[in-house]
Amino acid sequence: MQTIKNNLGEINISIETIESMVSLNLANVKGLVGSKKTIVKEITDMLMGNINKENNTPRNIKVEIKDNNIFIDLSIIIKYGVRIPDIAWDIQNRIKEDLIKKIDSDAREINIHIQGIQFPKKAQSRKDLVASNLFIKVF
């Protein structure tokens, strides 16, 4: 449990609770595909013993509370064609407004890390490939 001081007093809140709040805010963002856990994060979690199967919060959300300030890092994947500054601004505003509304505290930093772009899936035929005659037919 972490303590956050606001105008009315103190709030004892867990980091997992803030992660869940952030996760719920991400559910309705247009252009956001999802998130993925980086291989470095997976290895780090394994070595540090941070694997918790009961925790349903995605590991793409990292929350820290230092000196009464909330720091949030998000790693996301977006759809192709979405303007990155627009989606980042939307996510940051949603999280900021929700934190102010629910715990009367603002995040000091909300950092958005774009880990990938999901391209539309097209059915490609051999004729569409640039050098289709170089592929060996295995079938």
Image: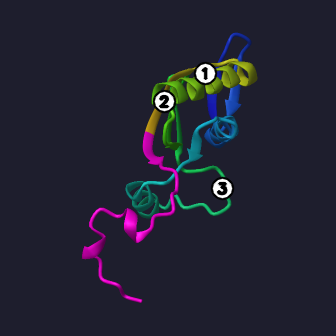
Of residues 121 and 106, the one drawn nearer to the viewer in this rendering: 121
Image x and y of residue 95, in percent: 63, 27
Q: Nearer the viewer, mark 3 or mark 2?
A: 2
Of residues 32 and 127, the one drawn nearer to the viewer in this rendering: 127
Image x and y of residue 102, in percent: 75, 24
Mark 3: which amino acid? Asn
The residue wearing badge 3 is 55
Image x and y of residue 14, in percent: 65, 39
Of residues 13 and 60, the one drawn nearer to the viewer in this rendering: 60
Q: Residue furthest top?
A: 7
Of residues 1 and 92, the one drawn nearer to the viewer in this rendering: 92
In the image, 85: left or right of 22? left
Q: Residue furthest front?
A: 127
Mark 1: which amino acid? Asn
Mark 1 residue crowding within 10 angstroms, few (<14) / some (14–19) / many (20+): some
Q: CA distance from mark 2 to mark 1?
A: 16 Å
Q: Which residues are magenta?
A: 114-139
Where is 5 relative to 73, above or below? above
Residue at position x 48%, y 54% from top? 37
Mark 3 residue crowding within 10 angstroms, few (<14) / some (14–19) / many (20+): few
Where is 60 relative to 103, above or below? below
Residue at position x 67%, y 20% from top? 97
The residue wearing badge 2 is 83
Q: Nearer the viewer, mark 1 or mark 3?
A: 1
The local secondary structure at tag 1 comes to helix
Label placed on residue 93: 1
Residue 136 shown in magenta: yes
Can you say which quadrant of the picture contains the N terminus?
Answer: top right
Mark 2: which amino acid? Arg
